Amino acid sequence: MKIGKLLTDPEGTSIPSAEISLLRWVLWYPLLSGRELVRLEQSRRRTQSGPTQRLPVLCPPAASQVGRQVHHLVNRGLLLAFRLHEPGWPPAQQRYALSAAGVAAFAHQFQPALSLQTLAQYPIEQDDLLSRLARPFPTLVLASCFTSLIEFEGEQQGWHVRAFQYPCSWRPLLWHSGTLPSHGAGRPDAAWCLLRQGQQAISLLLVIGPQQEQPFPWHQASRLLQQLARHQEAHALQSRLRPAPLVLVVSAAVHLPVWSELLQRPAFTQRPLPQGGVLLLEQVRQYGFLAAPCWCFSNLAALERASMTASSEAVMLRPTVRVLLQEQLTLPDQSPVSQPQSDDEPGRLQVQRKQWPGTSQKDQRRWKRSQSWCLPDPGWVARLIAQAPDSDGSALPGAGSLTATARLNLALTARHKRMLLLLARFPLLSLAQLAQLLEPGQDRRRLQRSLLVLSAANLVTSLRWPAAPSRGQERWLLTEVAVAYLVTRGELPQGWVALPPAELTQMQHTHGLYACLAALLRSSTHESTIIASWMWSTRESARRWFDPQQQQWIQLRPDATWIIWLRGHPLPERLLIEYDRASRQREFLAKAETYAAASQQIRGRFPPVLIITTQPRATARICTCWQISGAPQPMLPLLEAELDQPDRLNQLTDWLLQLYSP
């Protein structure tokens, strides 16, 4: 529906003041949940009631009242409701966005009515909502951060959240800091926030890291940290600027050692690190954004080189986000805030028109030439979800575009999405191996029904491996449609291949490796010293470094990586896995020499290596080759037949505890 005709309509819709406030929150940040709207409303009412009459957040009467108001707005067609099923979030959670009628009704509550130029600064367009539905993970994480920042506004007297923009480019961040963008500066998947009190301001950049089961983007993360380090260096050289922006990266716990390794590279040790640090997504959801402890970049960079005692002290001294913000308030700031103002702004101001990742420059030029914007309405939502899956999954649409990806996100369950991402990382899994890697101990019949749904939707397919036992002959992998869907969701990089050619030529090796990984994960669930563990595939574990002395690249490709979080340890520990099927001594010696060369490129502690072999007599040959190569990292050989023995896993964890003991 076009916005121009709605705003020129002289007849407005009468809305109670409490419902106007709800529309204002959704105007500022679409796809808020009902619980988040309750928290926002309670924060607003607490601020209005004064410091002596603070009401508890989420008290039942207020929560039910806000719920009735939201339901009333949905029935009147002013709000659109979507049910999202995302891994790690409450199932079938209702989230809300403004409809075209809601935008028009809200605009007519002001005298004169809000102009098109004012409303265009907010994410009200159909394409904006479609992009958020196609890439929901950053939206959901930032919604929790946004809600907490509004609560922080109520705690700090006189402070206001002046702007909250997602997605953001580098331009508002650099404009506020006074630095110029370098050539080729990228745009992170992040939100930019501005907190203000009078002429004093805090600039906050919230960067969303990859999900727990998503391959870590090494190159993009390194470029992001380099860009932030250059900004920090510019701030240090120009004292006339206001304090540097506070950078907070929200990441999964499994990726915490990777951020630590990146910060130890020479590119960051030679520059001042940015202010801020890394937040664990699990702790943000458990404690809230403001109460979540933060791994400061400086501490994280030195953590792997520190002793266990120093690491434990660093864990105890981690500041919370609330403490970091309060420290920013005390920093001197003598430069005025010159944010753009608007006389008829309905609330907080978006800084700049957005450009979503994946939209072409041609589409942007077409948008600039357009004189009107298309807004979502109930009819558009009905068409979007019209292809909901039947019981056999035959009505699921294809993938590749934002519209098709948003449809699939609304149709698929969280289990379906986890299965697709797991098969992208580990192709050619059998049903039993898929069950063990996805969630040990789950019902295989339920998993089989989910595979049938995905197969009917042309998202997965199967290959038959005759050499395997009868129950393990059927192997599952993604189709090109599913790869395009995950790429559009932002969970896989561009150019990801569903089935690398080497997988089919080394089927015996692939099957044996998957069986070992499943056995390790199954055994780790019964080990009391292991808090959590994750597995990386070969493609995720592959690394390369440039050796300046030899003037050549060093390519290291472990068969897998086991990330283990041991009880009492500040960081998860990585354990590189090599699966050996009677390799010749010359071949294994070359692999050991590669490990020795790679260890010289790491400034911190190189991960230990677990070598799983199928033959007992190969253990002595492996140890000999490792000693000849001079590889400094610890190595432990293990027989494949011993993986199911609990005593052997206890010896493995004891070995790791001894390696990382004080």
Image: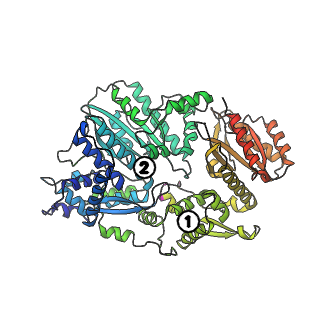
Q: Is residue 553 above or below residue 521?
A: above
Q: Which residue is mark 2?
A: 141
Pick out the residue farthest to the right. 617
Residue 268 seen in render: no
Q: Which residue is mark 1?
A: 480
Q: Which one is in front in this view, the residue at disc 2 or the one at disc 1?
A: 2
**Magenta span covers which residues?**
488-492
Give the dominant element type of the magenta stretch: helix, strand or loop: loop
Q: Position of residue 459 (x, y in %)?
A: 55, 68
**Label 2: few (<14), some or many (≥20) within 10 Å?**
some
Indicate yes or no whether the magenta region holds residue 594: no
Taking the spot 38% from the left edge, 55% from the top edge, the residue there is 361
Element type where label 1 sits in the image: helix
Taking the spot 68% from the left edge, 44% from the top edge, the residue there is 576
**Label 1: few (<14), some or many (≥20) within 10 Å?**
some
Q: Position of residue 42 (x, y in %)?
A: 29, 47
